């Protein structure tokens, strides 16, 4: 395990220990972030401590005392917060408690998700802002307000009641979904995948599934993660370049994850109640069970996307359905659907819109328009591997288009 992945895994555990000991969530979150930075600077030179978790808790505890001392006129609590030899809860994993705490009903769903992505998922403010399609400064303010509201609500670090868990579960699952997506396909930077982030999302999803074994959507989300992550070994080439699903060497897919994911979603669908995560997992299962690209049952995938589109008002789902429609009925049908989707302001200008158009124009034999849209998509993505892939696709199809060309 790399130091980065270890710190990411320990972050929510350490935060839980510090919140449990001192109670001030906002200050504890800041203290833990400082402790993580200190570890990243110190450990490469001084070596890994024998107990990394305890080391981080101790450093964060000292940061908390520094915080209290700056507030001495208001609190006068220096003597009440001595640096302990051992902080209670150091060996306890409070990740689930933090997850449900950050999804407290005092927060709006958007604020709860943003705070959880920061405190539990370990995403930076910039990454969270990118996921929400808002400026980084806006997201920083949102997270700061969320931390204040958690502090002012007086909520304790404890597992909520069953009714409270059910009320917060939607936000919890959405958070895990976003964490996994950022790990599987990083939205920014030079790396296509962040395996430690996807792995952490799967680890936490397993915990939620163990806590709520009868919840079909919890099982559906875990199955979706497993079936998607199974393809990870084949998604990049020797130089880290992106390899699309249709070109992947399927013998490199993780057969054990596929078996586990298929069994999980099959058992879940048999229970009757079907939700969006289960449908997405079912779509992933259809892809994973095809031994060759040409064996993919696109008619079944189209039917599943049609059901999903009725449940989830999401332009990305509609875009995926347009691809499936093109595979079943031809690229012109898909392009007509994409034209309708492009009118949705939630997706207007998104690079995937141009990427799908490029792919469908290429299917239709229009190389000129395909190049136009591949280059437009490349200019809009913030992921370097995706940009390189899109530019390579444009180059593969030939000369650059004449200025002024459009759909």
Image (spheres, helix red, strand yellow):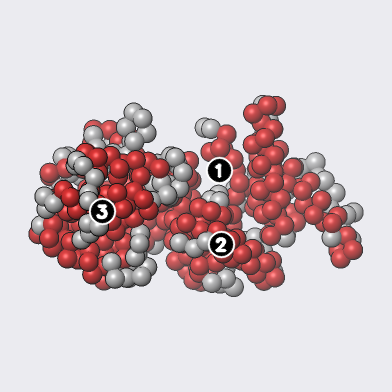
State if disc 2 and disc 3 touch (CB < 8 Å): no
In three-dimensional space, the C-alpha distance between marks 3 and 2, rounded to whole angstroms, equals 37 Å
Residue farthest to the front, as pictured: 403
In three-dimensional space, the C-alpha distance between marks 1 and 3, rounded to whole angstroms, equals 49 Å
x and y percent of residue 300 in the render?
15, 57
x and y percent of residue 248 in the render?
24, 37
Q: From this view, report whether residue 113 is shown above or below residue 64.
A: below
- The residue wearing badge 3 is 403
Q: Is residue 357 visible?
A: no
Nearest the eye: 23 or 152: 152
Look at the numbered disc 3 and give the secondary structure of its residue.
loop
The residue positioned 55% from the left and 43% from the top of the image is 9
State if disc 3 and disc 1 touch (CB < 8 Å): no
Q: From this view, report whether residue 25 is shown above or below residue 381.
A: below
The answer to which of marks 1 and 3 sits earlier in the sequence is 1
Look at the numbered disc 1 and give the secondary structure of its residue.
helix
**Mark 1: few/some/many CA within 10 Å (<14, 14-19, 20+):** many
Q: Is residue 405 visible?
A: yes
Q: Is 236 situated left or right of 157 in this image?
A: left
Image mark for residue 9 = 1
Look at the numbered disc 2 and give the secondary structure of its residue.
helix
The answer to which of marks 2 and 1 sits earlier in the sequence is 1
x and y percent of residue 247 in the render?
22, 39
x and y percent of residue 142 in the render?
59, 65
- The residue wearing badge 2 is 139
Disc 1 or disc 3, which is closer to the eye?
Answer: 3
């Amino acid at each position: 395990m790399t130091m980065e992945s270890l710190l990411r895994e320990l972050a929510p555990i350490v935060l839980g220990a510090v919140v449990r000991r001192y109670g001030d969530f906002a200050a504890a979150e800041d203290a833990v972030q400082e402790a993580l930075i200190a570890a990243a600077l110190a450990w490469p030179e001084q070596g890994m401590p024998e107990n990394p978790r305890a080391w981080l808790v101790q450093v964060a505890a000292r940061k908390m005392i520094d915080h209290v001392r700056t507030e001495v006129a208001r609190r006068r609590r220096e003597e009440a917060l001595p640096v302990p030899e051992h902080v209670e809860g150091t060996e306890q994993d409070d990740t689930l408690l933090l997850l449900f705490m950050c999804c407290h009903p005092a927060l709006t769903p958007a604020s709860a998700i943003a705070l959880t992505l920061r405190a539990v998922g370990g995403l930076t403010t910039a990454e969270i802002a990118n996921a929400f399609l808002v400026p980084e400064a806006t997201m920083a303010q949102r997270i700061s307000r969320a931390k204040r509201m958690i502090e002012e609500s007086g909520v304790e670090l404890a597992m909520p009641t069953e009714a409270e868990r059910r009320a917060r579960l939607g936000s919890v699952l959405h958070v895990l979904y976003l964490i996994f997506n950022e790990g599987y396909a990083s939205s920014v930077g030079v790396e296509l995948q962040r395996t430690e982030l996807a792995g952490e999302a799967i680890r936490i999803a397993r915990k939620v599934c163990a806590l709520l074994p009868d919840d079909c959507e919890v099982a559906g989300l875990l199955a979706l993660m497993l079936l998607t992550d199974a393809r990870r070994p084949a998604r990049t080439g020797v130089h880290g370049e992106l390899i699309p699903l249709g070109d992947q060497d399927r013998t490199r897919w993780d057969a054990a994850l596929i078996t586990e994911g298929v069994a999980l979603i099959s058992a879940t669908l048999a229970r009757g109640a079907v939700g969006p995560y289960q449908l997405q997992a079912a779509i992933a299962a259809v892809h994973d069970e095809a031994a060759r690209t040409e064996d993919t049952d696109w008619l079944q995938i189209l039917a599943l996307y049609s059901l999903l589109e009725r449940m989830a008002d999401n332009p990305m789902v509609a875009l995926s359905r347009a691809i499936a429609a093109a595979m079943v009925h031809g690229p012109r049908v898909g392009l007509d659907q994409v034209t309708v989707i492009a009118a949705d302001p939630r997706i207007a200008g998104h690079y995937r819109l141009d990427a799908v158009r490029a792919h469908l124009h290429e299917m239709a034999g229009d190389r000129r328009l395909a190049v136009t849209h591949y280059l437009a998509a490349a200019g809009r993505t913030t992921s370097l591997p995706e940009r390189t892939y899109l530019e390579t696709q444009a180059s593969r199809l030939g000369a650059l288009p004449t200025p002024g060309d459009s759909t």
